[in-house]
Amino acid sequence: MDPLRRNLAESARGFMPADEGLALHTAACDLPVAGPLLEVGSYCGKSALYLADAAQTQGRLLFAVDHHRGSEENQPGWEWHEPDLVDPEVGLLDTLPHFRRNLFMAGLEQTVVAVVGDSVAVAQAWGTPLAFLFIDGGHGETSAHNDYDYWAPHVALGGRLAIHDVFCNPAHGGRPPYEIYCRAKASKEFADVASNGSLRVLVRIAPAPS
Ligand code: SAH
Ligand code: MG
């Protein structure tokens, strides 16, 4: 990975350890099928920096889907709330300015298309088969399962699906990302490719049922 971008990614605000970020970058390199990359859940752009560097070297786009209002666990009173990310005029979280700044600093504005909106709403209007899908949106029961249900069918045959915050041991984190990882395996549509910390990478080995 480009060393300047690696530095920016490591210092960007967000929830991804450096080794998992590099594993995400590696997983998104040399994709064997045509199509763009897409992430669900961008926050301030940390994971997008890793993915976009990989996308750019392949001449591909990264679509970054997020309403930029934060997940449940980012709201005031919750564990992952960062008060300075609240827009004082509006009184709600707004991570979009941070996201844009990070992508600009990395010289990746031409590679990344920010899609600001609700994940399911965007997925329902989506039509392009994906070479790479990264799911790291809301980690609540409904959000995580919706992201899998609505986005996984868009992964092309031979394309990859990465899921973050997969904890086999419930003592280490919430269940929903782990549950959707299990569903991907149980579907027989996806097979394991790589694993690093809480990151899991799979490949689509059978088409989604139509
Ligand atoms: N990948 C990021 C972390 C993402 S945090 C990183 O590397 O740091 C999860 C993100 O999912 C939040 O920014 C939140 O706004 C977004 N999110 C949660 N539910 C969503 C939904 N239904 N639609 C769009 N974005 C959502
Ligand atoms: Mg995460």
Image (cartoon, helix red, strand yellow):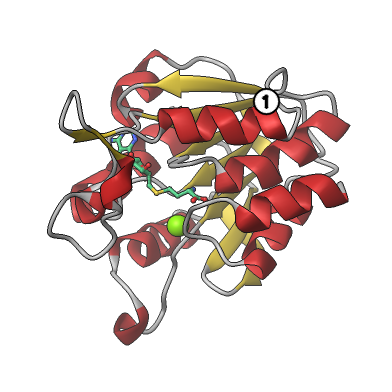
Residue 124 placed where, x, y %?
35, 19
Name the amino acid type tagged 1.
Pro
In the structure shown, which secondary structural element does the residue marked by tag 1 occupy?
loop
Quadrant in which the C terminus is drawn:
top left
Quadrant assignment for ligand 1: top left
Label 1, residues with CA under 10 Å away: few <14, some 14-19, many ≥20: some
The spot of residue 208 in percent (x, y) is: 50, 36
Query: Residue at horizontal 62%, vertical 29%?
Result: 130
Image coords of residue 12 (percent x, y) = 58, 50
The image position of residue 135, as x and y in percent, is: 47, 46
> Residue at label 1?
36
Q: Quadrant of residue 92?
A: top left
> Considering only vertical position in the picture, is 136 above or below 40?
below
Taking the spot 57% from the left edge, 74% from the top edge, the residue there is 197
Residue 1: tell me if it is visible: no
Q: Is residue 126 visible in the rendered structure shown here? A: yes
The part of the image, by quadrant, that contains residue 97 is top left
Nearer to me, 83 or 110? 83
